[in-house]
């Protein structure tokens, strides 16, 4: 999974303007993020039509605020730069819940 460097919302939208992307917001100190992280390679492999991008919420706090990501871990899906779905809250997420979210897109 590619780790997104610190960037603005405009820079992000330029990066993801072509194709399908899944942003995964997390932080190193977040226990619920640590819970889902081991499942991420399998989830990523199940959905090869999405390019997964890891976003460190602390490094990209302004971007998280601009995208209204207040809780982590969180996921936002994009298709050609347009948001097509979000699974954003502060709750722990299971592999099955993330798969259900991606399948719903």
Image (tube, helix red, strand yellow):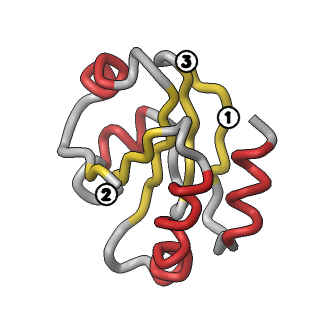
Disc nearer the start of the sequence (2/3): 2
Residue 63: x, y in percent?
Answer: 34, 38
- Assign a secondary structure to mark 1: strand
Q: CA separation, marks 1 and 3?
A: 9 Å
**Disc 3 crowd, CA 10 A, few/some/many (<14, 14-19, 20+):** some
The residue wearing badge 3 is 82
Q: CA separation, marks 2 and 3?
A: 21 Å
Residue 56: x, y in percent?
Answer: 31, 57
* Left or right of 5 on screen, residue 105: right
Instruction: Tell me the quarter of the image containing the C terminus.
Output: top right
Residue toward you, 59 or 14: 14
Q: CA separation, marks 1 and 2?
A: 19 Å
**Disc 1 crowd, CA 10 A, few/some/many (<14, 14-19, 20+):** some
Residue toward you, 12 or 105: 105
The residue wearing badge 2 is 56
Q: Residue at x 54, y 82 (%)?
A: 35
Q: Which mark is residue 85?
A: 1
* Left or right of 32 on screen, residue 103: right
* Left or right of 58 on screen, residue 52: right
Disc nearer the start of the sequence (1/2): 2
Residue toward you, 27 or 49: 49
């Amino acid at each position: 999974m590619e780790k997104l460097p610190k960037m603005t919302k405009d820079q992000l939208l330029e990066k993801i303007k072509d194709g399908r992307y899944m942003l995964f917001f997390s932080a190193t100190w977040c226990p619920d993020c640590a819970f889902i992280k081991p499942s991420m390679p399998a989830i990523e492999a199940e959905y090869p039509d999405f390019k997964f991008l890891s976003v460190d919420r602390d490094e990209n706090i302004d971007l998280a605020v601009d995208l209204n990501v207040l809780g982590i871990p969180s996921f936002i899906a994009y298709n050609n730069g347009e948001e097509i779905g979000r699974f954003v809250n502060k709750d722990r997420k299971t592999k099955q819940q993330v798969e259900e979210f991606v399948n719903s897109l």
